[in-house]
Image: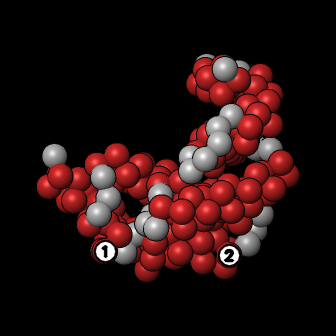
Amino acid sequence: ACLGLGKVAVAEGRNAEGVAFLQNALAAAPLSEEGPGIFMDEMNVLGTLAEALFTTGAIDDLEPLVLRFRAAAKAETERRGGVCPQEVSSLYFSARLHEARGRPAEAVGEMRMLLDLLCESALQVMSVHMLCQCILQLHRAHENLKMLDPKRGKKELVKAVRAKLATLQLLLSQAQ
């Protein structure tokens, strides 16, 4: 319930209230499910909470959440034996955090890991839902990361992200 209330509050611009609900949801997330999907609820809350904290500018609260998100997403990818969209999201949030903290080399490194994660062999076995999730995260990265600004960003990284987006969109159009 807290996850839904938090999402609604954030969507309506009541960020402080939304963050409080999302923090409650995060506290309960590991307890909400047992078995192979244990990380899914937690990652859903972590992603939503991270986005809300970025919106409010609460960068100091983000670092432990992003690290937790990265760990949960890596574990889910390993459990699946293939890329999960949450790992793409966690790398995006990690790059965004590094950039906000003034660590451009680390931010670029996270984006390169994100692009490497989306190699051709991984893309060929992705569902339509996963392709859409990856496209969404790359669009968010393009919109929110200074390093991907076409005029002032890292040219080779901007080009690589655009190329990966084009590949993802082509695969999506072929899958439909």
Task: Please state if 123 lies on the left or on the right of 13 as rendered.
Answer: left
The answer to whether residue 13 is seen in the rendering is no
What amino acid is labelled 2 in the image? Glu
The answer to whether residue 60 is seen in the rendering is yes
**Distance CA(mark 2)–CA(mark 1):** 26 Å
**Relative depth, front residue between 160 and 169:** 169
Q: Which residue is drawn at 85% across and 52% down?
A: 60
Q: Which residue is drawn at 77% across and 63% down?
A: 101
Q: What element carries label 2?
A: helix
Q: Quadrant of residue 161?
A: bottom left
Q: Which residue is drawn at 65% across and 42% down?
A: 34
- In the figure, 175 relative to 123: above or below? above
The scheme the figure's colours follow is secondary structure
Residue 74 percent coordinates (x, y)? 60, 65
Q: Residue furthest front?
A: 35
Q: What element carries label 1?
A: helix
Residue 12 percent coordinates (x, y)? 61, 19
- In the figure, 174 relative to 176: above or below? below
**Relative depth, front residue between 126 and 105:** 126
Task: Please state if 63 lies on the left or on the right of 156 as rendered.
Answer: right
- In the figure, 49 relative to 11: above or below? below
- The residue carrying mark 2 is 106
- The residue carrying mark 1 is 121
**Figure quadrant of the N terminus:** top right
What amino acid is labelled 1 in the image? Ser
**First along the sequence among labels 2 and 1:** 2
Of tags 2 and 1, the one toward the viewer is 1
Query: Are dots 2 and 1 in contact, CB under 8 Å?
Result: no
Q: Which residue is drawn at 74% across and 56% down?
A: 68
How many labels sit on residues? Answer: 2
- In the figure, 171 relative to 119: above or below? above
